[in-house]
Amino acid sequence: MTPLLVLEQLLNGVQFGVMLFLMAAGLTLVFGIMNLVNFAHGSIYMIGAYLCAYTYGRTGSYILAILAALAGALVIGIAVETIVFRRLYRRDHLDQVLATFGLILFFNESVRLIWGDTALYSSVPPFLAGRVAIFPGMTYPLYRLAIIVVGLAVAVALYLLVMKTRLGMLIRAGASNRTMVGALGVDIALLFTLLFGLGAMLAALSGLLAGPVFSVTAGMGDGVLILAIVVIVIGGIGSIRGAFIAALLIGVVDTMGRVFLRPMLAAFMAKSAADNAGPALASMAIYILMAVVLYFRPQGLFPPRGR
Amino acid sequence: MADTILAAEGVVKRFGGLVATDRLSLDVAEGEVHAVIGPNGAGKTTLVAQIAGELRPDAGIIRFLGEDITRLSAHLRSLKGLARSFQITSVFQEFTALDNVALAVQAHDGHSFHFWRAAHSDPALRAPAQAILARVGLEARADVRASHLAHGEKRALEIAMALATRPRLLLLDEPTAGMGPEDSARMVKLLAQLKGAVTILLIEHDMDAVWALADRITVLVYGRAIATGAPEAIRGNEKVRRAYLGEDDVARPGRG
Amino acid sequence: MRLDAYRIAVAVSFLVLALVPAAAWAADRPFYLDLFTRVMVFAIAALSLDLILGYGGMVSFGHAAYLGLGSYAVGILDHYGIDNGFIQFGAAILVSALTAAFIGAVSLRTSGVSFVMITLAFAQMLYFLFISLNVFGGDDGMSIVRHSDFGGAVPLDNPTILYFAVFAVLAFCFWGSGRLVESRFGMTLRGARSNARRMTAIGFPIFRYRLAAFVISASMCGVAGALLANQLLFVSPAIMHWSRSGEIIIMVIMGGIGSLLGAILGAAAYVMLEHELSALTEHWLVILGPLLILIVLFAKRGLYGLIAREGGAAGG
């Protein structure tokens, strides 16, 4: 367990964390202002990954692939919003959860129908391949570094959007007091559609970045969705800042747990026992973290004020 | 003087920079109807929430029956005999009127970890509930769903639920809110019947009701009690007149 | 009180279930015995969820976890050579109850959408836990060698006896749930669903009643899991997958939320729909997904709503 290994895993954790943040941001935004639980957010993530991998494979142009993924997600997001979600805003959360569950089944199976059961090959573009030296003696995959940079840039952009623009003012007002936004005479339907599109593009961005790191398969969005849910529950539902901090926390804890728990346990228990307990504990670590946070703060770390 | 049932001493509640309750002291004597009045934004709702146990004061003490209940949870306050009604009607909409009251009776009849016997045919719940419905004039409406009751009837049902907990103190948060003159008069009549039998802390906007019922009145302005006294004293109080400047409620001749 | 139509519907439903084995034998379609055993196992699971969802307003999106815990209780004890049914089913109930007590203690501090998400997350935790347990087959699951043994009195290896054993458990759960929702405990639960703030104001400590209901529900679901293990003689983490939890909710909704018979009808409808659609096409989920959205949008009262327009949980 060298310091360099720890540092590399720490970076992996951050990289995983920013991807979770991209997912969680859309989820928490949509919930915060629209009071809508969108479980189909993971499907958009999957669609983003598929469209990017497919377009890149067919055309060889990474830029085109990114554009296809983002535009596809935007179109599907807006279509789903107008066809299904508009009828759900006034319904209770149970209806929303179930309807979006129906969407997940539909999208997962549609992807299987189109691209088949096996994983779609997804590669890193040449200009992001290889490793770079972060400082003397330590190199790190350029692609993963790029994910961190993109994720942090999006986080900053979102921060500016939420804190400095009129749209952001509405988002903040909406997260703490929904009726007020209506009273301001804003075109709510348009605002919702815009936000939904934004959330969908963030999910697709997360998905297309994830493609070469994980495998591109049907259902790949489900696991990430649940992790994103853990993130926003810990961060405080509706809070972007909470989502960012919780995403990094989850990313690092999960990554470090998977790498280091087993050797740590082996230091003071039999190897065979550690071989079983290590992975088991690692798979539970973030959920235990969630339980501890919620026990002391049922509203999460940064609950939006006024609700 | 009769025993003090409820006493608030130096209660403070802040929301950010806003002081909603400002070193407020107040006491309610056994058997009296004590009204709290004040203009909008005087902090009446915040005061109710603190007495009922939904909000915790930042400073000060609230005593009930001589015991410090400042940190006691809302349901334990109810079990000690502090009953309340809500400003916005709060009943079990899909239950019948009788079921609503029976549930309140059940709350004070030991624990509810009884899994087998049907609550609907339990005379220990139904009989007292019937009697209380009769007391508020709803006996003919016992089997009507609460959601189908008229507004005035729902308000009376709220009083019945509070009574079903055999309270030592009734905390009534604007019982005539949203009522027309007729319903209002009926509610005042109902409360007048309860007067003497139950101690009441009445938060009220409708000054007619206050003059008709109150033994003592406390005037709340910006979270502070600026005056407490008998209705006549309050009517003549210069500070109260000034606080209510522009509102003619106090100036209007009372009917009490 | 209750509409007579309800009693008739209950009688007809159980009569139909009781006649299935004879009909399957007469029609020489033993497969239907298997299908309806599955229907009844999921009916018990749906019933358990309906108790807290329909009557307590708690949308647990993690009930498949208890189905899995019940199954693994049988599987793991069998793995170590313990096939005593009383021990196996006792363990299924105990483990489900203890797990639910822990999950409930955390998740019931919140409500609404947080509760949905937290129950989902904890169920996912158990799913990953069993995937990581290589001793018990990990991802691939484990086979079960012997059926639960109740002193030789109920040989569950006979499909017809297994069928009637599940039938008996379902009937008992249905009857017990019916008593429970009408009892003082049930009224407390329904009151807390209707108006939690009011409940607190009249003196109910609603947290502990909700937690108790959550634990009871999980235990019942654990029993369903133990029965499922006996039917399949196999258990894998797939049974705890979050989509399974979603399916149990769908069963409750399809049947009609907050009516106990609805849970049984919903389970029957879902299992048969699954059977028919999957015979139609391998990609049957493409049909089920939109169908589900349509049900949520337009047929919220479910099958039970077709039988009775009034009554159910809301009436009394």
Image (cartoon, grey):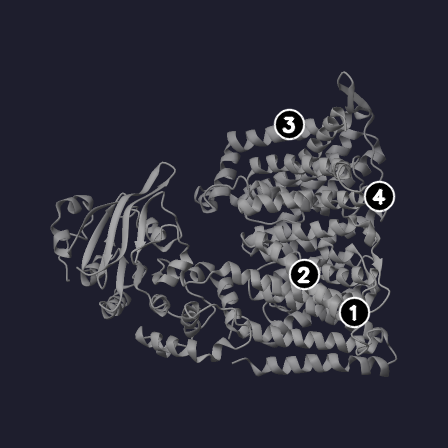
Report, in whole angstroms, how far the alpha carbon at label 4 lies from the one at label 3. 30 Å
Q: What chain does badge 3 belong to?
A: A
Q: Nearer the viewer, mark 3 or mark 2?
A: 2
Q: Which residue is mark 3?
A: A153
The residue closer to the viewer here, C35 or B34, is: B34
Residue A247 is drawn in which quadrant?
A: top right
Q: Nearer the viewer, mark 4 or mark 1?
A: 1
Q: Residue B206, image x and y in percent?
A: 24, 57
Report, in whole angstroms, how far the alpha carbon at label 3 lies from the one at label 1. 60 Å
**Mark 3 Cα within 10 Å, few/some/many (few <14, many 20+)?**
few
Left or right of B207 on screen, residue B59: right
Mark 4 residue type: Ala
Is residue A202 placed above or below B174 in the rendered structure? above
Q: Which residue is mark 4?
A: A119
Left or right of C182 on screen, residue C98: right
Q: Give the residue drawn at x 83%, y 60%.
A: C79
Is residue A287 placed above or below A61 in the rendered structure? below
Q: Residue A243, image x and y in percent?
A: 60, 38
Residue C51 is drawn in which quadrant?
A: bottom right
- The reply to whether callout 4 and callout 1 are in contact (CB within 8 Å) is no
Which numbered dot is residue C84? 1
The total of numbered circles placed on residues is 4
The residue closer to the viewer here, B161 or C144, is: C144
Report, in whole angstroms, how far the alpha carbon at label 2 lies from the one at label 4. 36 Å
Q: What chain does badge 2 belong to?
A: C
- The reply to whether callout 2 and callout 1 are in contact (CB within 8 Å) is no
Q: Residue A146, image x and y in percent?
A: 73, 27
Report, in whole angstroms, how far the alpha carbon at label 3 lies from the one at label 2. 45 Å
Q: Which residue is mark 2?
A: C96
Q: What chain does badge 1 belong to?
A: C
Task: Please identify the residue farthest to the right as the structure is shown.
Answer: C28
